């Protein structure tokens, strides 16, 4: 089943610093999930000035519960980078899988 995650960062003065501090651990986890075919697509949301303010991911995972367990250990969650996260079922056409 596919899901789309939209995650907006905290907006306090230290938010970007926390994102930078957790970035390598976050990317390593995404690489592993990409290799397992769980991450179909991912990228950073940018503000008008090109600064990262969040993330979007399209995932192929067995269930919403599976994603919830992953987010419990995701560095951008544990490191207080992502503040507002939405997770929605998403239909990826077979031609893109």
Image (spheres, grey):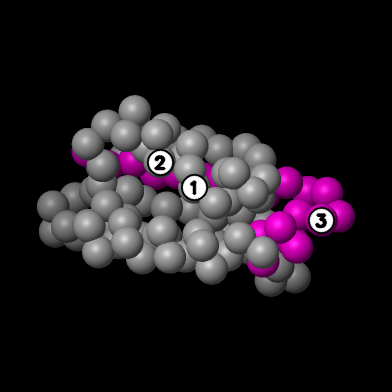
Taking the view exactly as shown, the residue that stands out farthest to the right is: 13
Q: Is disc 1 in contact with disc 2, using a CB cutoff of under 8 Å?
A: yes
What x and y, as percent, mark residue 79? 64, 49
Residue under pointer 3: 14
Question: Secondary structure beneath disc 3?
Answer: loop
In 3D space, how far apart are the residues under numbered discs 1 and 3 (Cα atoms)?
19 Å
What x and y, as percent, mark residue 58? 36, 51
- Neighbour tally class for label 2: few under 14, some 14-19, many 20 plus, Cα within 10 Å: few
- Neighbour tally class for label 1: few under 14, some 14-19, many 20 plus, Cα within 10 Å: some
Tell me which segment is drawn in magenta.
Answer: 1-20
Instruction: Assess whether residue 4 is covered by the magenta stretch.
Output: yes
**Res 97 seen here:** yes
Q: Is disc 1 in contact with disc 3, using a CB cutoff of under 8 Å?
A: no
In 3D space, how far apart are the residues under numbered discs 3 and 2 (Cα atoms)?
24 Å
| Foreground of the two, 22 or 10 | 22
* Figure check: 62 above or below 33: above
What x and y, as percent, mark residue 80? 67, 45
Residue under pointer 1: 74
| Foreground of the two, 91 or 54 | 54
- Neighbour tally class for label 3: few under 14, some 14-19, many 20 plus, Cα within 10 Å: few
What residue appears at the point 42 percent right and 53 percent down from the top-left corner?
Answer: 57
What residue appears at the point 40 percent right and 60 percent down from the top-left corner?
Answer: 30
Point out the tag, 3 or 2, that comes first from the N-terminus: 3
| Foreground of the two, 27 or 84 | 27
Residue under pointer 2: 70
Q: Which corner quadrant of the image does residue 46 belong to?
A: bottom right
Taking the view exactly as shown, the residue that stands out farthest to the left is: 94
What residue appears at the point 26 percent right and 47 percent down from the top-left corner?
Answer: 60
In 3D space, how far apart are the residues under numbered discs 1 and 2 (Cα atoms)?
6 Å
């Amino acid at each position: 089943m596919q899901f789309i995650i939209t995650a907006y960062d905290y907006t306090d003065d230290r938010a970007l610093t926390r994102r930078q501090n957790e970035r390598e651990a976050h990317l390593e986890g995404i690489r592993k999930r990409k290799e397992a075919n769980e991450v179909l697509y991912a990228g950073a949301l940018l503000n008008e000035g090109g600064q990262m303010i969040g993330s979007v991911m399209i995932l192929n995972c067995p269930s919403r519960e599976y994603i919830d367990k992953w987010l419990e250990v995701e560095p951008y969650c544990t490191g207080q980078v992502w503040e507002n996260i939405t997770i929605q079922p998403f239909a990826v056409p077979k031609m893109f899988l």
